[in-house]
Every structure is written in structure tokens, then in C-alpha cells.
Image (spheres, rainbow, N blue to C red):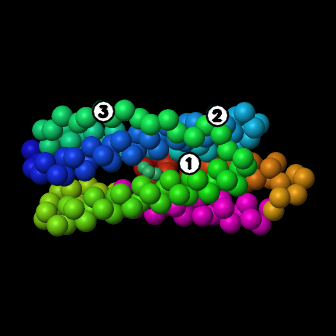
Amino acid sequence: MIDLSPQMQQAINNQISYEGYASNFYLALAYWCDDQALEGCKKFFIRQSDEERFHMLKLYEYMSESGVLPITPAIAQPPINYTSIQEAFQKVFEQERSVTLSIHNLLKLAQDENDYNTQHFLQWYVDEQREEEAVIRTIMDRIKVIGEGGQSLYYIDKEVEKINLQVVAAEAMEKGE
Ligand code: FEO
């Protein structure tokens, strides 16, 4: 059994809520892309939504292992509409930055409390956030290179689909599949 301070329990519960929101945020975005006939982007965001759910479930398990009953949060309504794919990826970047910040704050709390188990547990999230931000930055850079000409949406969608397959392959390698 792992000891979690009441403050840490609250902070991990908050993180459950952020990851749950992120999962729904990406799900809504996937179906906005579907509506815009951006099938490659839809696949990217469906996978991302599943990943965020996995991030959330890992927190549930960590609390459960600690003998604490996790609180399942109400989830706020995410945006359902965007003016462009450029705006959508800008919002994605902001979303990931805010999760990174909350993970870093959680880690700081674990350090302040000399909670070594939680520090160790959170390292996975620190790495995951760094990787996710790098992928989003790559997509935003490619979108800039492609520009906003007549066929640009077609090429952006193909590029995001390609990057999605690279992420899937990298994850499979990490898991040793
Ligand atoms: Fe789990 Fe991308 O935040």
C-alpha cells in the first residue's frame, strides 16, 4: 500500500479530471474532422482520445493501489467547432501545454512531500507529455510549410495521417510488439 497525503489524493483526482477532459476534447475534435471530411486527422484524434483515456485510467489504478477510492469527475463540455484546422491544432497545443503544466505541478508537490513513489509514477507522464508536445509541434510546422493554398487541406490531412501511423509504430516499438 502506498501512502498518499490528502493533498496528493486531491491533486491526482484533479489530474483524472484533466485527462478525462482531454479524452473528450480529442473525441469532439475527431468528429469535427469527420464533419470536415478530414479522415487522416480524425484517425489521429481518435487515437489521441484513447491515449488520454489510458492516461486517466493509469491514475485510477495508482489511487486504487494506494487504497484510495478515485472520484470519477463530471466532465466539462469541450469545444465542438473550429474555424480551421490551423486553429484546431493551435487549441490542441494549448491543451497539451496546460496538461504538461499540471503534471509538472503534481511532480513538484510529490517532491515537496518527499513522496518518492508518486515522483517515480509521474515520470512516465512527464515523458509522455514531452513526446505529445513534440508531435503537435511537428504537425504545426508541417501545416505552415504546406500553407493555405487550394489543395492545402488535402495535403495537411495526408500529412497528419502519416504522422499518426508513425506514432502508432513508435508506440508499438516501445511496448515491444
Ligand atoms: Fe494526457 Fe496529453 O495529456
Res. 162 in view: no
Circle 3 sits in a helix, a strand or a loop, which is it?
A: loop
The residue that appears at 13% across and 48% down in the rendered structure is 6
Closer to viewer: mark 3 or mark 1: 3
Residue at the spot of label 3 = 72
Residue at the spot of label 2 = 31
Residues 168 and 56: in front is 56
Residue at the spot of label 1 = 168
Please give left or right for residue 106 compared with residue 51 in the image. Answer: left
Closer to viewer: mark 1 or mark 2: 2
State whether the magenta stretch is mostly helix, strand or loop.
helix
Mark-to-mark CA distance, 3 and 1: 29 Å
Res. 153 in view: yes
The image position of residue 93, as x and y in percent, is 56, 58
**Quarter that holds the N terminus:** top left
In magenta, the rendered stretch is 125-146
Determine which quarter of the picture holds residue 59: top left
Residue 161 part of the magenta-drawn span: no
